[in-house]
Amino acid sequence: MRRCLLVFEPPDGGVAENVMRLALGLEERGWKAWVAGPERSIIHSRLEAAGIPIAKLPFERGYGEPAQDLRALRGLLGLMNDRFDVVHAHSAKAGVLGRIAARVKRTPIVYTPHCFPFVGPWGLSRRAFSVGIERALGPLTDAIICVAESERELALEKHVASPERLHVVHNGSLPCEEGLERDPELEALREAGPLAACLAVLRPQKAVHVFVEAAAFVLERLPEAQLAVVGDGELRQNLERRARALGVDRRVHFLDFKPPASRQLRSIDVFVLPSAWEAFPISILEAMACGIPQVATDVGGTAEALEDGTTGLLGPANDPMALADRITTLLADPERRAQMSEASRRRHAQHFGLELMIERTVDVYDRVASGSR
């Protein structure tokens, strides 16, 4: 059985979910997974229960802690003394350290950026720095897995790697878990009126403040509407203060995330993702799998997942009024929501199942391990 080391840095969100699903699914396809990640992550307990070896390393976001980065690099080099057929690094920081370690140990390396680090509202110096790193490491990378066609196009535009090194593998997700007990708090809100909820890690990227700002417009047009923010993260207190300042704090309910996502998705009528930037959001796929119509911003590869007008509605980023228009349109039209629900389940089953993602990823591993890009 071939051996793969999965390296990741973000402790939660879509990257961690992707790594966990790969680790749990590789063995059936002839690959044994090891995982190297941050010291704390929401996926560690699940991986440990499955018997997957985990190395917990001092990964830090950004480049402000060089001593920590050096410790993490040493840890990876030590792990790679035990030979692997492929190392697969996920996200920018793990991509830098993982690719350096893999090249030192002469191990084939695959990299999935899950959104290149130069994408986002960054200054010119940070963008130039990030582009420079990606260009320097691109030729040392046997394969780059882009999670969306738009990400591949961006890699070519920025001269990150040559076309033959770039592979598109859309993210995938499990079917909706139907047997779970529904969330009682969300169910109570839904009984009072049609419910739109934003389920996301509360970081700047997800721009949940736009949903909070859209709330007043939604409630003005549809007073019976119910709104919720479901998630945890660094911005939660700021978002709660913003809701109070806008006078919608009694109508926008903040709830903790209770995994798996299916548990809470099945208790809402419209899923909302107002992101400022994305690669290919797994949360859209999870909502689709549960038959929940989606309202999202047209950023990154989101339009490759959400079929505008069929499974949900796309709109511009950072536009509370436009977001409110789309939320209100769906909350006020149960017949259209029912049509979108059916279309969403069908689209997920045809294009975004987890098995298909793992199969295509393993195909890249096999090609890289055999020396063929």
Image (spheres, rainbow, N blue to C red):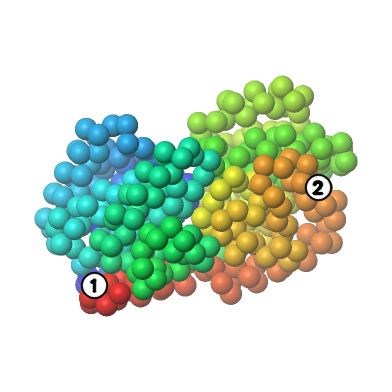
Residue 359 left/right relative to 95:
right
Asked whether 271 or 60 is in front, the reply is: 60
Residue 18 left/right relative to 278:
left
Residue 62 left/right relative to 314:
left
* Residue 50 in sight in this render: no
Asked whether 160 or 210 is in front, the reply is: 160
What amino acid is found at the position of numbered circle 1 in the picture?
Answer: Ala
Q: Residue at (32%, 36%) from the top-left corner? A: 63
Query: Where, quadrant-wise, is the N terminus in this rendering?
Result: bottom left
Residue 210: image location, x then y, percent? 68, 38
Residue 8: image location, x then y, percent? 34, 50
Residue 288: image location, x then y, percent? 63, 61
The quadrant holding residue 237 is top right
Q: Is residue 232 above or below residue 174?
A: above
Q: Residue at (54%, 68%) from the top-left corner? A: 352
* Residue 61 in sight in this render: yes
Residue extending farthest to the left is 81
Query: Where, quadrant-wise, is the C terminus in this rendering?
Result: bottom left
Secondary structure found at label 2: helix
Q: Residue at (59%, 65%) from the top-left corner? A: 304
Q: Residue at (20%, 44%) from the top-left corner? A: 73
User: Residue at label 1?
Assistant: 369
Residue 56: image location, x then y, percent? 26, 43
What amino acid is found at the position of numbered circle 2 in the picture?
Answer: Asp
N-terminal-most mark, 1 or 2: 2
For disc 2, the neighbor class at 10 Å (few under 14, some 14 to 19, many from 20) is some
For disc 1, the neighbor class at 10 Å (few under 14, some 14 to 19, many from 20) is many
Q: Are marks 1 and 2 in contact (CB under 8 Å)?
A: no
Secondary structure found at label 1: helix
Asked whether 142 or 199 is in front, the reply is: 142
Point out which mark residue 325 bears.
2
Q: Is residue 292 above or below residue 249?
A: below
